[in-house]
Image (cartoon, rainbow, N blue to C red):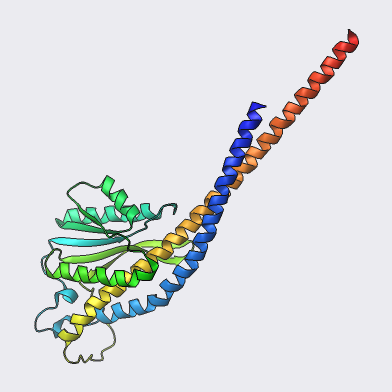
Amino acid sequence: MANLKELRNKIGGIQSIRKVTSAMKLVAGVKLRKAEQKAVASRDYAAELGKVLSGIHRDQFDVPCELLCGREVIESELLVVFASDRGFCGNFNYLVYKAVLDQLESAKKSGRNILIWCVGAKIHNILKHRLSKDVHLELIPEFFKAEELLNNSNSLGHRIVRGFREHQFDRVSILFTRYYSVMRRTVQIQELIPVKYEESRDRTTTIFEPDIESVLCNLLPFNIGVQLYQAALESVASEQSARMSSMDNATRNADDMLSGLKIRYNRTRQQGITQELTEIVSGAEAISNG
């Protein structure tokens, strides 16, 4: 009967875990719907703004605009990595970590120094314990507050522009997970500085007032804040999607374990009853024969 007690304890423990994973799945689903709406709503705006800037001809400047055109010599690069502050989201952070390793390997082959700013405590902890000490690693704390996400993105954008102009780094990229659907999300890298040039078929001439330098002096930093904000929204939606899928799998696994344990419990209980009946019948026969 001690075995039955152990099985009952296991069943009770797994049922408690199942309640938690099921509740976390529901919460993640609600948060995902909100995050998805925000990410989709601003996606076209961020993409169109980037498209406008990428189509500007580089030969329109008397003095090259480094925020747009970049620098000739790239000695150091800043990589802003978006992940999550919390766990229980499957392989979400691990895939980001693998992408960071690929970027570090590429920078090493090119002879560039790389600075990593982590937006997300989990990825910072992973990189802190697995990267060498010579890699500059910094955590951007408390970034994902919903009510301050846009302001935090703009503040981070201003800091990036200031660091670039002070020659702390010569190129800036962001690494984040783009959300497509509940079952599909991919880790992507996007270059912020310089803006990648894409030749457009549209041959119309763009007129800047008062002049192109004055317009881009305000528009380029603004674009960096917009792209950071969009990357954060995509990352939040992807995180909630990964967490919902992970908790759904955990709940299914708990159901499978419960099913197996209940079968074992019923069989063990039946064996105990059968054994007791056998002992009673044997005892009754022994008394009657005696």
As displayed, is residue 87 above or below residue 176?
above
Quarter holding the C terminus is top right
Give how far across and how far down residue 141 sits, in percent: 30, 59
State the residue in front, 134 or 57.
134
Count of numbered circles on the image: 0
State the residue in front, 199 or 115.
115
From the viewer's perspective, tell me whether residue 183 is left or right of residue 44. right
Give how far across and how far down residue 152 sits, in percent: 30, 69
Q: Quadrant of residue 218?
A: bottom left
Residue at x 19%, y 57% (from the top left corner): 114
From the viewer's perspective, tell me whether residue 157 is left or right of residue 93. left
Give how far across and how far down residue 16 sits, in percent: 57, 46
Residue at x 51%, y 53% (from the top left corner): 247
Of all residues, the one furthest to the right in this rendering is 288
State the residue in front, 124 or 267.
124
As displayed, is residue 103 above or below residue 281?
below
Give how far across and how far down residue 111 sits, in percent: 14, 55
Residue at x 17%, y 49% (from the top left corner): 134
Quarter holding the N terminus is top right
Observer able to see residue 273:
yes
From the viewer's perspective, tell me whether residue 163 is left or right of residue 230. left
Q: Quadrant of residue 263?
A: top right
From the viewer's perspective, tell me whether residue 184 is left or right of residue 204. right
Of all residues, the one furthest to the top in this rendering is 290
Of all residues, the one furthest to the left in this rendering is 63
Q: Quadrant of residue 85?
A: bottom left
Observer able to see residue 199:
no
As displayed, is residue 22 above or below residue 290?
below
